[in-house]
Image: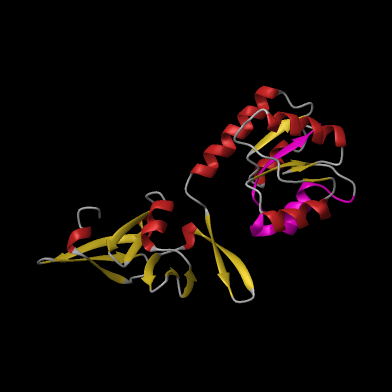
Amino acid sequence: MIVDDEPLAREGLRMLCAADPEVRVVAEAGDVDGAVETIRRLRPDLVFLDVEMPGGGAFEALRELGPATPLFVFVTAYERYALRAFDVQALDYLLKPVSETRFRDAVTRAKAARRASPRRLEIREVGRVRWVDIDDIDWIEAADYCVELHLGAETALHRASLKDLEAELDGRFVRIHRRAMVNRDRIREVRRRGTAVWVVLHDGRVLPVSRSARGRL
């Protein structure tokens, strides 16, 4: 998605996007309100976001979007916002007029970020959608048609299979049982007594490890 109040700037970015067969422009907006509404509705993979626009700019849009913020690249004629841009985790910072080389660099970074394991999981519940940071999950347990995420004293249901989620999280969790996997960073110790093995998590919770999973652990 392209967000800029200048039609010529949007056209320039649209032409750069058209040169990449893997990139499709799904929407454009010229102000903050239109940008926020469209991002929430379409959930684009990447947003090229102008810093200064009438009625508010990029930082106002990011505040409104909150956890729903997609990957974004700042596009601006001014260098003075660069440090603040990276404070809010901008993927890149392009100065106008945007060169073809810098544009390709930004898109390459976006593609790599999309291929990486997610930072958050989208949890759909009755009447709301929320996002859970992967790093906040202690362990994950299979639960019928979904999985149960354990986050400290809280649990959340997520519609996915344990197998698919294990692949999606790209090694950040280790399978300890056919029905459970744990966040590697949450493992405090591994205990063994005879043929039985357990993992102890940071909060003292003890989980059994199946015989078939010991090699992976």
Q: Position of residue 126 (x, y in %)?
A: 60, 76
Q: Quadrant of residue 176?
A: bottom left
Depth check: give the residue in front, 88 or 14: 14
- Above or below, comparing residue 99 to residue 135 in the picture: above
Quarter in which the C terminus is drawn: bottom left
State the residue at coordinates (59%, 38%): 110
* Left or right of 172 in this view: 217: left
Residue drawn at point x = 37 percent, y = 50 percent: 171
Magenta stretch: includes residue 67: yes
User: Residue 74: x percent and y percent?
Assistant: 72, 39
The correct choice, above or below, for 148 with respect to 169 in the image is below
Residue at 40%, 49% in the rendered image: 170
Start-end of magenta stretch: 55-77
Q: Is residue 13 above or below residue 187?
A: above
Residue 88 percent across, percent down from the top left: 67, 47
Name the residue rendered at 32%, 66% in the picture. 180
